[in-house]
Image (tube, rainbow, N blue to C red):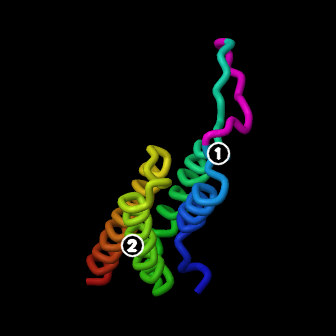
């Protein structure tokens, strides 16, 4: 059952909680990354959530290659996470940011990729078994 939980739910939940409780954290610079050019790249709280989301999206895409019943449940739950994130974006003023829009877009990519990879894998399995 725990393998069925979409990992991006943690990013959506973290952003939602932070936006409602301590919204200033999302825009605060947490650290800076010095670049060879001499410039510095500031990392804000929202940026850190985006990086975490991208890493978790990679894991979700890898997990989509499985066709187990846990993977199917994961796809359905990923769709639920996307719908919740979309509703939050549309109706909650504190979620109206480009950062949350990109997180919501990651959940959509997770849904599309999950179903696409699973269907492709199932077709390939059917062709090889014939």
- Which span is picked out in magenta? 27-37
Q: Is residue 15 above or below residue 24?
A: below
Task: Provide the secondary structure element on which disc 2 rests.
Answer: helix
Towards the viewer: 13 or 21: 21
On-image quarter of the N terminus: bottom right
Mark 2: give few (<14), some (14-19) or many (20+) Cα within 10 Å.
Answer: many
Circle on res. 53: none
Identify the residue position indicated by label 1 in the image: 24
Residue at screen point 54% across, 68% down? 9
Percent position of residue 98, x then y: 44, 44
Q: Which mark is residue 79?
A: 2
Whether 32 is among the magenta residues is yes
Callout 1 secondary element: helix
* Marks 1 and 2 in Cβ contact (< 8 Å): no
| Coordinates of residue 16 in the picture (x, y in percent) | 56, 61
Quarter of the image that includes the C terminus? bottom left
Q: Residue 92: x percent and y percent?
A: 44, 60
Q: Residue at x 32, y 66 (%)?
A: 116
Image height check: is 124 above or below 91? below
- In this view, the residue farthest toward the top is 37
């Amino acid at each position: 059952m725990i393998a069925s939980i979409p990992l991006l739910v943690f990013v959506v939940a973290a952003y939602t909680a932070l936006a409602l409780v301590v919204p200033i954290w999302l825009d605060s610079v947490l650290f800076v990354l010095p670049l060879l050019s001499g410039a510095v790249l500031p990392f804000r709280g929202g940026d850190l959530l985006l990086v975490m989301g991208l890493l978790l999206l990679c894991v979700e895409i890898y997990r989509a290659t499985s066709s187990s019943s846990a993977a199917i449940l994961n796809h359905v739950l990923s769709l639920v996470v996307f719908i919740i994130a979309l509703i939050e974006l549309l109706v909650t003023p504190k979620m109206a940011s480009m950062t949350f829009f990109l997180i919501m877009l990651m959940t959509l990519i997770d849904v599309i990729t999950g179903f696409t990879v699973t269907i492709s894998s199932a077709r390939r399995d059917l062709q090889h078994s014939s």
